[in-house]
């Protein structure tokens, strides 16, 4: 190997090392977040809310809404489909797309009830007016009582008359961020805002440089070794 | 404008697009099999709840279960997770014996064969033994093991709950 070649190899090796150290931090973060995202559903990260202080610090969301999930997570129930709560004369009704959760005044879960028991495939909206609870699915509206005993399907005229009221609509997710959302943002470096795209491109370029320089160093080393032999 | 946006979000939400087969609505099931039944609630005492949890092998939410009752027969609409999604079944119990089992809503991507009459007929006249097992062997279905287990749990749970309601009635 000539002196020039040796100098070049040393310089490449030095920069290869520097890139590797710099990139390794990012790669570890990518691997850990990727692993967690891959198992987000199994580990309930897609339903578990981010801790409020972290949510406030990272996203600037200061939700004053009561934590809908808290009474359910206490009972080991995933609350990924929960979208609102209705205050009842006695207790609270948590509204999920598929299930209703009746809580007593102390926040204890009294009953979990499938919306299919009211003839609804899924709950799309709900309205509480005094002691009347209206549950709306894709094709019908059911009137029930706060203890959810029985239900009467409203005719289309009566259902239409309720359209202008303050319905709690599914699909409008309360101000809560799940761990999965946080991990996805971390994984994609979205916290950097508009710079995230450039940052990711840069990191990808660094990985390519690292791979190419690594291959080049390997070849140079192998050639030198075979010459020595 | 806001409500229009909300409805649009709803229509395009994954929940709206979720795979779900409704074989029969629970209310129709009750109407067909126990027409004119009275809706009741069964409050679960701590010991009953722990019995239930042992039987289904997972925490049981809440402290009450609703059912429909007529002429000594009870109808139960129960949810049980197959693999990841709940299977909703309707079970009619007549004096501790299963009279009818029907899968009403199936949400899993596999194992829907459990809704077939040839499978659910196996539960007819089944009784719950003192060790909380069924008095008979239920033939499984290849590729639907978890759905079959879920259905077994539902039937056992319905039988247990029916037993509790009968004991309560006898106490009074």
Image (tube, coloured by chain):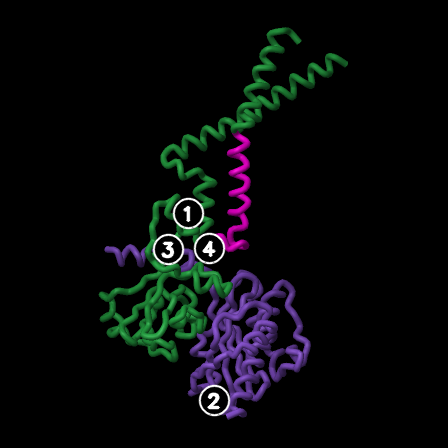
Instruction: Identify the hue of chain A.
Output: green
Vertical comparison of B42 with A75: above or below: below
Residue beneath label 3, please? B12
Q: SS for tag 3?
A: helix
Q: Earlier in the sequence, mark 2 or mark 3?
A: 3
Distance between mark 4 and mark 2 Cα atoms: 42 Å
Label 1 Cα crowd, 10 Å radius (few <14 / some 14-19 / many 20+):
few
Front: mark 2 or 3: 2
- Residue bearing mark 1: A54
As drawn, the chain in purple is B
Q: Which residue is mark 4?
A: A48
Q: Which residue is mark 2?
A: B70
B100 versus A213 height, above or below: below
Q: Secondary structure at mark 1?
A: helix
Q: Specify the segment rendered in magenta.
A: A23-47
Which chain is disc 4 placed on? A
Task: Decide whether the magenta segment is chiefly helix, strand or loop.
Answer: helix
Is residue B117 visible to the viewer in this orientation of the structure? Answer: no
Q: Are marks 1 and 3 in contact (CB under 8 Å)?
A: no
């Amino acid at each position: 190997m000539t002196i020039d070649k040796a100098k070049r190899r040393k310089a490449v090796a030095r920069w290869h090392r520097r890139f590797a150290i710099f990139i390794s931090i990012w790669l570890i973060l990518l691997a850990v977040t990727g692993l967690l995202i891959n198992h987000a559903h199994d580990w309930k990260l897609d339903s578990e809310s981010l801790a409020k202080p972290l949510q406030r610090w990272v996203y600037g969301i200061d939700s004053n809404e009561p934590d809908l999930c808290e009474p359910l997570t206490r009972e080991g129930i995933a609350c990924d489909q929960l979208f609102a709560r209705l205050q009842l004369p006695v207790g609270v009704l948590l509204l999920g797309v598929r299930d209703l959760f009746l809580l007593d005044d102390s926040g204890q879960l009294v009953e979990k009830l499938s919306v299919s028991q009211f003839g609804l495939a899924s709950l799309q909206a709900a309205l509480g007016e005094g002691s009347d609870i209206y549950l709306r699915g894709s094709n019908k509206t059911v009137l029930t009582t706060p203890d959810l005993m029985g239900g009467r399907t409203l005719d289309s005229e009566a259902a239409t008359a309720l359209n202008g009221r303050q319905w709690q609509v599914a699909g409008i997710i309360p101000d809560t961020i799940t761990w999965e959302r946080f991990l996805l943002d971390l994984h994609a470096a979205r916290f950097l805002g508009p710079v995230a795209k450039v940052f990711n491109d840069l990191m990808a370029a660094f990985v390519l440089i690292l791979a190419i320089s690594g291959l080049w160093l390997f070849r140079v080393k192998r050639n030198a070794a075979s010459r020595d032999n | 404008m806001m409500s229009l946006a909300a409805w649009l979000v709803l229509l395009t939400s994954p929940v709206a697009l979720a795979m779900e087969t409704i074989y029969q609505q629970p209310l129709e099931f009750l109407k067909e099999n126990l027409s004119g039944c009275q809706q009741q609630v069964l409050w679960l005492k701590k010991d009953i709840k722990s019995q239930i949890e042992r039987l289904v092998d997972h925490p049981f939410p809440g402290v009450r279960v609703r059912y429909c009752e007529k002429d000594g027969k009870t109808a139960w609409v129960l949810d049980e997770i197959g693999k990841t999604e709940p299977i909703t079944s309707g079970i009619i119990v007549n004096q501790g014996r299963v009279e009818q089992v029907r899968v009403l809503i199936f949400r899993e991507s596999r194992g829907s064969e459990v809704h077939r009459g040839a499978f659910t007929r196996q539960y007819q006249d089944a009784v719950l033994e003192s060790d909380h097992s069924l008095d008979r062997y239920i033939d499984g279905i290849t590729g639907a093991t978890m759905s079959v287990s879920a259905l077994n749990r539902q039937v056992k749970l319905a039988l247990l709950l029916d037993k509790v309601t009968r004991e309560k009635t006898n106490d009074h």
